[in-house]
Image (cartoon, rainbow, N blue to C red):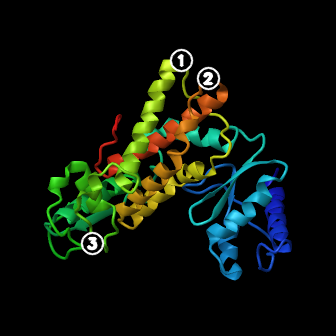
């Protein structure tokens, strides 16, 4: 399918959504498809959902969700993933690198912890002037690490005028321990007051830090168990994991946004999104009972390990340990 043919296909999907009453918009004369940008995936991408969101009176994410089923059932399209605020990333049948899951997992495996790193801010020197305060120090240090992933250099200084002043911590976070203290200071947005409470130490679903670290530990566990069962990860098609694929494909964009806005909280919240997507998937990775490991199991393992790589890399940028066991 050529870009021109794909453009017509997307336009036809919009017309079908309008005809079926799912969207109330004027059908545009043309749709632009381009190569996926940072955080994108697949063969082509289009911002048509962002273009139609305002006239449709809804979010671009919702418009993309409406259009996706009309596209994935079209001959010649292998898969469609929604990333960012509503970009439609289209993977074609027979394209080099196979389906979306295969190409995305291969990219993550090749890059390792550097997946999502780029040159969006290449050559920039960002001076972060902060007060002598625990949260300001933590935010500045994490921001400098995130800036480095986008080719910039962050320099932390303690002098006026202050350029980075998050709401201070109400008390010393040190009693929480290094990891929980770091999360408590970085997870809230800079304008929100951090909670320095024992909730960050509780091992339960209501604790975002626990979910992120537990998700990584679960992935490492299935990897060890796969070795015992005599099979290894191999990228391949994985059906029905739109949520996880979208979260992983969106990681480069989230890193760029966190660096651009000097906001490590954006990365922390994204890691929660990845964790919440991979945790329900993990139980499907290993064979059950007398079932023998198959290509499907190897592909699922590769996808789970890709999620683990993203979680470990993100936690490292935040200065938090990614446990092997939990």
Q: Earlier in the sequence, mark 2 or mark 1?
A: 1
Q: Residue at x 13, y 66 (%)?
A: 132
Foreground residue, 18 or 180?
Answer: 180
Give the spatial CA distance, label 3 vs label 1: 49 Å
Q: Quadrant of residue 49?
A: bottom right
Q: Residues within 10 Å of mark 3 (few under 14, many from 20)?
A: some
Q: Residue at x 33, y 61 (%)?
A: 187
Q: Is residue 113 above or below residue 235?
A: below
Q: Secondary structure at mark 2?
A: loop
Residue 46: x %, y % from top left: 69, 62
Q: Residue at x 43, y 43 (%)?
A: 215
Q: Quadrant of residue 224?
A: top left
Q: Secondary structure at mark 3?
A: loop
- Please name the residue that numbered disc 3 is placed on: 193
Q: Earlier in the sequence, mark 3 or mark 2?
A: 3
Give the spatial CA distance, label 2 vs label 1: 8 Å
Task: Judge left or right: residue 104 versus residue 279.
Answer: right
Q: Which disc is residue 230 wearing?
A: 1
Residue 117: x %, y % from top left: 44, 49
* CB within 8 Å, label 2 to label 1: yes
Q: Secondary structure at mark 1?
A: loop
Q: Quadrant of residue 296?
A: top right
* CB within 8 Å, label 3 to label 2: no
Query: Exactly how many numbered labels are in the figure?
Result: 3
Foreground residue, 263 or 323?
Answer: 323
Give the spatial CA distance, label 3 vs label 2: 49 Å
Q: Is residue 94 above or below residue 133?
A: above
- Please name the residue that numbered disc 2 is placed on: 293
């Amino acid at each position: 399918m050529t870009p021109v043919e794909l453009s017509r296909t997307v336009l036809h999907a919009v017309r079908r959504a309008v005809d079926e009453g799912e969207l109330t918009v004027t059908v545009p004369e043309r749709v632009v498809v381009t190569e996926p940008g940072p955080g994108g995936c697949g063969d082509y991408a289009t911002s048509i959902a962002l273009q139609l969101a305002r006239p449709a009176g809804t979010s671009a994410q919702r418009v993309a969700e409406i259009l996706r089923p009309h596209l994935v059932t079209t001959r010649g399209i292998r898969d469609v993933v929604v990333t960012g605020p509503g970009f439609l990333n289209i993977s074609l049948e027979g394209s080099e690198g196979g389906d979306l899951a295969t190409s995305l997992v291969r990219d993550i495996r090749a890059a390792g912890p550097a997946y999502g790193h780029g040159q969006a801010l290449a050559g920039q020197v960002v001076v972060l002037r902060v007060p002598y305060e625990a949260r300001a120090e933590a935010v500045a240090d994490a921001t400098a690490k995130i800036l480095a992933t986008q080719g910039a250099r962050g320099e932390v200084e303690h002098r006026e005028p202050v350029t980075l002043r998050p709401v201070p911590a109400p008390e010393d976070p040190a009693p929480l321990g290094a990891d929980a203290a770091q999360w408590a200071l970085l997870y809230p947005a800079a304008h929100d007051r951090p909670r320095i409470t024992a909730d960050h130490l509780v091992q339960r679903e209501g604790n975002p830090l626990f979910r992120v670290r537990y998700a990584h530990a679960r992935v490492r566990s299935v990897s060890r168990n796969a070795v015992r069962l005599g099979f290894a990860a191999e990228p391949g098609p994985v059906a029905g994991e739109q949520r996880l694929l979208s979260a992983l494909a969106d990681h480069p964009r989230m890193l760029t946004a966190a660096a651009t806005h000097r906001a490590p909280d954006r990365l922390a919240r994204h890691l929660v999104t990845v964790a919440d997507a991979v945790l329900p998937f993990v139980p499907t990775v290993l064979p059950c009972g007398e079932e023998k490991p198959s290509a499907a199991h190897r592909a699922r393992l590769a996808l789970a390990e890709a999620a683990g790589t993203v979680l470990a890399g993100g936690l490292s940028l935040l200065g938090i340990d990614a446990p092997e066991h939990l």
